[in-house]
Image: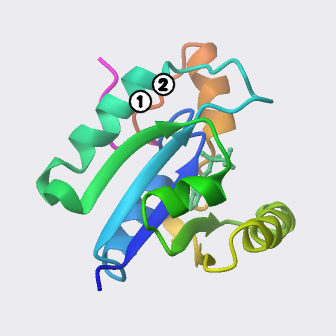
Amino acid sequence: MKKTALFPGSFDPFTKGHKDIVLRGLNMFDKVIVALGINTKKSSRYFEAELIIKKIRETFREYGDRVEVITYSELTADLAKKHEATVILRGLRNTTDFEYENSIAQVNKYLNQELETVFLITSPEYAHISSTIIREVHFYKGDISEFIPYSLN
Ligand code: ADP
């Protein structure tokens, strides 16, 4: 049976760290669905969702239908069920990520018992990359090209 993993996130913006997680996910699963959550709490994004979706699609074009990119605004556990994904893929950089990821994983398991969350420890070269810092650098007109796997121009 085909194994599909869902990689949910805000991706505001999608970074080289995120790309690394998708590529490593493709080594384990037949398909990775990158799902950009249009979040209720973080309602206002910095980078437009449509732009980021387009850039993520371009980034993984060579993988054809093994990488799908979608937006969503529902429970991740429900989304996984809908797309027949049995795994949620997440990245872990540090203990702060762990605290947060631990509670989301518990809730997702409660909501959908068939779902397992698989955590990938960030590759050291990308461990310092965070969407929050990239937004800050971009806001003050700094160069963010080193942190993202596509060009924004
Ligand atoms: P969310 O708002 O859901 O935390 P993010 O877009 O910030 O979404 O992150 C999505 C996932 O990618 C999370 O599991 C996060 O820990 C992981 N991640 C973020 N930055 C990196 C990185 N540099 N390396 C590996 N994983 C990362």
Quadrant location, the N terminus: bottom left
Query: 40 left or right of 79?
Result: right
Amino acid type indicated by mark 2: Ala
Residue drawn at the location 43% of the way across and 59% of the way down: 83
At a point 28% along the width and 57% down the height, the residue shown is 67
**145 versus 89 height, above or below:** above
Location of residue 100 by image quarter: bottom right
For the C terminus, the image quarter is top left
- Magenta region includes residue 98: no
Marker disc for residue 52: 1
| 149 to the left or right of 81 | left
Badge 2 density bin: few <14, some 14–19, many ≥20, Cα 10 Å: some
Q: Position of residue 133 (x, y in %)?
A: 67, 36
Per the image, label 2 sits on a secondary structure element best described as: helix
Q: Image quadrant of residue 55?
A: top left
Picture quarter with ligand 1: bottom right
Please state which amino acid type lies under the numbered disc 1. Ile
What is the C-alpha distance between the residues marked 1 and 2?
Answer: 5 Å
Q: Which residue is mark 2?
A: 49
19 or 77, nearer to the observer: 77
Q: Is residue 29 above or below residue 75?
A: below
Give the magenta range.
Answer: 147-153
Magenta span: predominant SS is loop
Q: Residues within 10 Å of mark 1 (few under 14, many from 20)?
A: some
Left or right of 92 in this view: 24: left
Q: Position of residue 19 (x, y in %)?
A: 40, 55
Residue 21's tag is none
